[in-house]
Amino acid sequence: MAEEEMKGGPGGFTCRVIAAHRASFPYALAFSAGDTLSVEDRETVWSGWTWCVDAARTGAWVPDGFIERRGDSCIALRDYDSTELNVDTGAILKALEEAGGWLWCVDGSGRQGWVPASCIEPCGESRAL
């Protein structure tokens, strides 16, 4: 992605990685709006996230606002991908969405994924998501 495409504005803001991040899991859970998932009660330091499991038994943390919980199951309210983006200090990203202390970002190579908000800082412009 060209530097000019990574500037903030509608739909995101440009940010710099201030602490490296590596994915917590070697796999990702992806689902579409309307899918039914199982819910498992698990403890996490991240409030606002629920552990969901698909029919193939792949599980991952999902922002509470992305699902409608129904007892031990839930319905997806939107498409979702739990991919975490591996990033190194100093990298420039474009943050496109925020959920529960994490940001969905795209890097200069076009790779996308979640990064903890604590690992990034805005690059000299107002933060508007």
Image: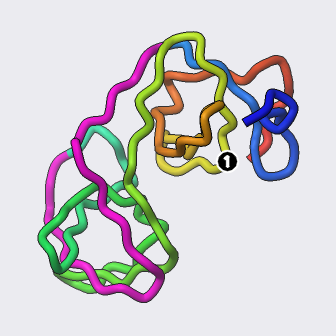
Q: Quadrant of residue 68?
A: bottom left
Mark 1 lies on residue: 96
Q: Is residue 23 magenta?
A: yes
Horizontal and vertical percent position of residue 44: 23, 44
Horizontal and vertical percent position of residue 119: 50, 22
* Vertical arrangement, residue 75 with respect to residue 52, above or below: below
Colour treatment of the image: rainbow
The residue sitting at 15% across, 74% down in the picture is 56
For the N terminus, the quadrant is: top right
Question: What is the count of numbered marks?
Answer: 1
Horizontal and vertical percent position of residue 81: 42, 60
Q: Which is more toward the observer, 2 or 28? A: 2
* Vertical arrangement, residue 6 with respect to residue 62, above or below: above
Position of residue 125 in the picture relative to residue 91 (left or right): right
Mark 1: which amino acid?
Answer: Leu
The residue sitting at 86% across, 50% down in the picture is 10
Position of residue 91 in the picture relative to residue 68 (left or right): right
Magenta stretch, residue numbers: 19-43
Main SS class of the magenta portion in the image: loop
Mark 1, residues whose alpha carbon is within 10 Å: few (<14), some, or many (≥20)? Answer: many
